[in-house]
Amino acid sequence: MNNKERRVGTVSRGIRCPIFRQGDDLAQLVTDSVLQAAENEGFELRDRDVIAMTESIVARVQGNYASVDDIANDVRAKLGGETVGVIFPILSRNRFAICLRGIAKGAKKIVLMLSYPSDEVGNELVSLDKIDAAGVNPYSDVLSLEKYRELFGENKHEFTGVDYVQYYGDLIREMGAEVEIIFANQAKTILDYTDCIINCDIHTRARTKRILKANGAKVVCGLDEILNAPVNGSGFNEKYGLLGSNKSTEDKIKLFPRECKDLVLDVQDRILKATGKLVEVMVYGDGAFKDPQGKIWELADPVVSPAFTDGLIGTPNELKLKYLADNDYKDLSGEELKKAISESIKSKDDNLVGNMASQGTTPRQLTDLIGSLCDLTSGSGDKGTPVVLVQGYFDNYTN
């Protein structure tokens, strides 16, 4: 028996997996991949380890795809196929461009209303400094495309090199619709142009719908209400519609995964049977963090985690070690200090909300924190690790 003190806390491992296809037994493949990694790399699973799967492999196995034509048919049926206002979309080739192709194909004219100076997740159309220099008030001023170009010219995205104003306009015309582009931040502005509206904002969508309906809109659909049921046998998401979708091909999207609580419980059960350890399991999409350079807030999905086991409900309940060391035990050091802090942790309350010794700990949902860790671990490119194993997350200084 090795009684050495553990010197490692939280560990996050990307787990290499096969390429998943529609119809695969995902629970079995994920279980096998984790167990094989443990055997090959020489580590053991423990109670309260977290196994996390990217939303994309779940949606792929579910076959949750839809085409531009499927989107167009749903838009035409729900908004009448004439002039449609499309407001507050995010600026993204991966996240919105294919959706926009479908929307444009389902209408005769699109009035595209972009928020400025940036979209909801922080992609800049124009810098705040330029807004200030132009004497524009983004809260109240409505700019036509001509006025925007006159004031700010062409603005290519810092990281992608795309002028999204041009790109979205061209894309709508390619689909055979007329386009008018305006810039405004008040939802009701669109009602001066049309009373049939798709609001494309993600986290503010309920407020936007409420404002539009209160001001006389005839039809208001959020992206969450387009493809919230199958169209001609297409994929769909009953809860989120097009929200959380990604580009699959030039005329197809992969939707956010449908209900998958059974999947996480299945993986949990298989690991328990194989190892005797009770792990937590979750599905994760975008993490919730902001890039200080590009100003981009990562969360383009409607939630970080669409499904998780019950042990991941809630927020952390932690004490700030440096607070204890600098305040309660400032006169102690070495082994005495370690012992005092360990005793504080062992005897801490089940709910530390409002306790000064917990200030500075991160007050966010566990699934948002762990999902962000997993998103950064798996990356969004060619690492080939769509499953992440997090160990020691629920440990503390005394374990």
Image (cartoon, grey):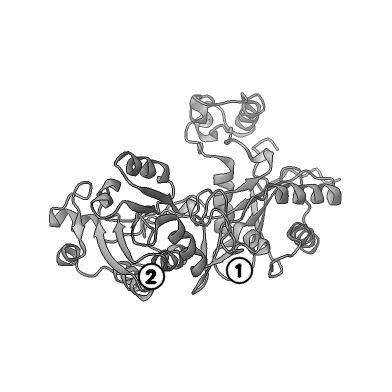
For mark 2, what is the residue?
Answer: 160
Which tag is nearer the camera, tag 2 or tag 1? Answer: 2
Quadrant position of residue 82: bottom left
Could you say which is closer to the camera, residue 230 or residue 60? Answer: 230
How far across and how far down the image is residue 34, in percent?
75, 58
Residue 395 makes an appearance in the image:
no
How far across and how far down the image is residue 277, in percent?
80, 45
Dot 1 alpha-carbon crowd within 10 angstroms: few under 14, some 14 to 19, many 20 or more: few
* Amino acid marked by disc 2: Thr
Name the image quarter holding the N terminus: top right
Q: CA distance from mark 2 to mark 1?
A: 21 Å
Name the image quarter holding the C terminus: top right
For mark 1, what is the residue?
Answer: 383
* Amino acid marked by disc 1: Lys
Could you say which is closer to the camera, residue 254 or residue 384? Answer: 254
How far across and how far down the image is residue 23, in percent?
73, 65
How far across and how far down the image is residue 374, in percent?
59, 54
From the viewer's perspective, tell me whether residue 204 is left or right of residue 280. left
Could you say which is closer to the camera, residue 342 or residue 56? Answer: 56
Q: Provide the secondary structure element on which disc 1 rests.
A: loop
From the viewer's perspective, tell me whether residue 86 is left or right of residue 9. left
Q: Is residue 120 above or below residue 112?
A: above
Q: Is residue 356 above or below residue 109?
A: above
Q: Provide the secondary structure element on which disc 2 rests.
A: loop
Q: Residue at x 50, y 53 (%)?
A: 301
Residue 74 makes an appearance in the image:
yes
From the viewer's perspective, tell me whether residue 112 is left or right of residue 379. left
